[in-house]
């Protein structure tokens, strides 16, 4: 079960109850921006500081190096992220 | 150099740059230099909708009961959106098609612009329903100073580019005397105009609609003008895709592998890019002030809306690697996000409110029993 460390000091276990990282973050009452929740708008982009994620569906949104889209991804390994 | 609708030069399309290479000859999608544009086309097509599918009839009563200052907010936003989509329904085609060199990008541009024409048609659908004199609403757009002020900045970069392309494709690089006027153009200058144009369109797609969107959804939060809100959600879904398209274009340009000049230009134009964002944000804040000049609406006022403009401007800038220019870091109206989620957008024909599927306005509800003695 990969664990998700958020720079605000929160640590979340990604235990499969959440569909995506965005869902998991929201379940912890963390506020992440979003619009489409489907990978095409880019509104949810966060920084991936360490670890690896995988996309549920390959997103269309433009993602810069070091960033990822939590709305359409799950962690592959333990990850550390920053919510802008 | 001169444009031709079917370039006879046999070329390897995979080696063409996005713009200013050979004009496209065969529209083929079996190979793509940038697969993202093909994916955007597919997504946009899957979003297809028709304004008439959305029943806006209840909005008429809602609108009649709005106090005058809220009527002003509603109708002004519609006028402004009409202006923006009038421009967007034609300009990507007119400006970019004569210089594009990749079939998937060419088709993306056409698909993009086509979806903007649907937006324009939807405004007529909305206005016809709430007003018995729709012509008055549309006629005013060309007279409304607050809207015309914006039109100038929305169209300037397109017009500069189109003007340069005309000269270049007719006369080539250099200084030319045309009707007694001396005009110069270089390919590099054209590329600069292209970059600034894409940047300004990016800002249009990213920021300019969102003040109106916020107002539409604020009405709908009060269960008012819900037909309109439904249409706005469909429009917002399309706009998000257009924004993704311009962000990819800007990124490909700035990276320089596609065209080394473009990377250089992106650096040279950095300050101007900041200025374009800043000016658009200021104009949208002025617009918020104009909207609320006679009074705020429940859930929204000028200050909240201005903060939202700043917030969204920052996030759009950071998305393409620029620095935030405002100190706002919080979304002052987080409830807007749920209105922008795509799977909450219902356009399924089965949906009861969709008027075109209600035959003679009789709801065709069917339950299992109706098929009782139905054999195949
Ligand atoms: S919310 Fe749109 S890409 Fe994640
Ligand atoms: Fe549009
Ligand atoms: Fe658009």
Image (cartoon, rainbow, N blue to C red):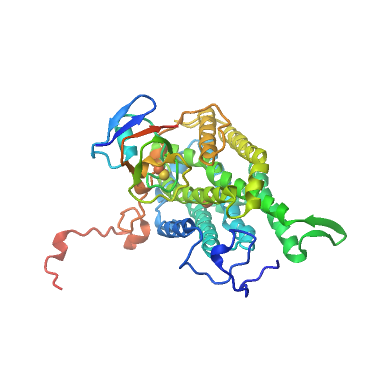
Q: Give the quadrant of residue B302.
A: top right
Q: Residue at x 60, y 53 (%)?
A: B87
Q: The C terminus of chain B is located in which quarter?
A: bottom left
Tell whether B224 sits left or right of B242: left
Taking A14 as reference, is B193 above or below it?
below
Q: Is residue B289 visible?
A: yes
Taking B122 as reference, is A16 above or below it?
above
Residue B179: x and y in percent read: 85, 62
Q: Nearer the viewer, residue B361 or B84?
A: B84
Q: Give the quadrant of residue B24.
A: bottom right
Tell whether A2 sits left or right of B118: left
Single out the residue that lies furthest toward the bottom. Answer: B8
Single out the residue that lies furthest toward the left. Answer: B373
Tell whether B342 sits left or right of B75: left
Q: Residue at x 49, y 63 (%)?
A: B32
Tell whether B211 sits left or right of B176: left
Q: Is residue B68 visible?
A: no
Single out the residue that lies furthest toward the top. Answer: A9
Q: The N terminus of chain B is located in which quarter?
A: bottom right
- The quadrant where ligand 1 appears is top left
Residue B231: x and y in percent read: 44, 50
Q: Give the quadrant of residue B109.
A: bottom right
Q: Nearer the viewer, residue B119 or B3?
A: B3
Residue B27: x and y in percent read: 52, 69
Q: Nearer the viewer, residue B98 or B252?
A: B252
**Number of residue marks:** 0
Q: Residue at x 53, y 34 (%)?
A: B314
Residue B31: x and y in percent read: 47, 66
């Amino acid at each position: 079960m990969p664990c998700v460390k958020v720079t605000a000091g929160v640590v979340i276990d990604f235990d499969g109850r959440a569909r995506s990282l965005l869902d998991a973050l929201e379940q912890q009452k963390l506020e992440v921006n979003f619009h489409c929740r489907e990978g095409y708008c880019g509104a949810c982009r966060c920084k991936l500081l360490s670890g690896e994620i995988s996309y549920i569906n390959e997103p269309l949104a433009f993602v810069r190096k070091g960033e990822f889209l939590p709305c359409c991804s799950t962690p592959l390994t333990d990850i550390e992220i920053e919510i802008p | 150099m001169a444009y031709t609708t079917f370039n006879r030069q046999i070329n390897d399309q995979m080696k063409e740059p996005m713009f200013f290479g050979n004009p496209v000859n065969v529209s083929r999608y079996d190979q793509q230099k940038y697969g993202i544009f093909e994916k955007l086309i597919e997504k946009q097509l899957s979003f297809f909708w028709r304004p008439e599918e959305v029943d806006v009839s209840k909005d008429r009563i809602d609108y009649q009961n709005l106090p005058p200052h809220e009527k002003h907010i509603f109708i002004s936003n519609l006028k402004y959106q009409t202006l923006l989509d009038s421009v967007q329904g034609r300009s990507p085609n007119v400006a970019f098609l004569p210089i594009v060199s990749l079939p998937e990008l060419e088709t993306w541009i056409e698909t993009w612009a086509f979806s903007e024409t649907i937006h324009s048609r939807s405004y007529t659908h909305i206005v016809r329903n709430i007003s018995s004199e729709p012509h008055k609403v549309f006629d005013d757009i060309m007279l409304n100073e607050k809207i015309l002020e914006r039109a100038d900045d929305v169209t300037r970069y397109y017009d500069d580019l189109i003007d340069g392309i005309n000269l270049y494709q007719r006369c080539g690089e250099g200084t030319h005397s045309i009707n007694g006027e001396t005009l110069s153009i270089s390919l590099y200058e054209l590329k600069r105009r292209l970059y600034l144009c894409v940047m300004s369109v990016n800002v249009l797609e990213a920021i300019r609609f969102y003040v109106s969107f916020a107002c539409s959804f604020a009405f709908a939060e009060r269960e008012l003008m819900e037909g309109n809100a439904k249409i706005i959600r469909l429009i917002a879904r399309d706009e998000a895709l257009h924004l993704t398209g311009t962000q990819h274009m800007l990124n490909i340009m700035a990276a320089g592998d596609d065209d080394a000049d473009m990377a250089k230009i992106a650096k040279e134009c950095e300050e101007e890019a900041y200025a374009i964002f800043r000016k658009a944000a200021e104009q949208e804040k002025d617009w918020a002030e104009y909207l609320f000049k006679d009074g705020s609406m429940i859930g929204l006022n000028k200050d909240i809306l201005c903060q939202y403009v700043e917030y969204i401007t920052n996030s759009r800038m950071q998305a393409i690697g620029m620095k935030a220019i405002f100190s706002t870091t919080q979304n002052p109206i987080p409830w807007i996000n749920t209105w922008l989620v795509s799977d909450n957008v219902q356009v399924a024909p089965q949906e009861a409110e969709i008027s075109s599927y209600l035959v003679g306005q009789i709801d065709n509800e069917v339950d299992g029993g109706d098929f009782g003695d139905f054999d195949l």
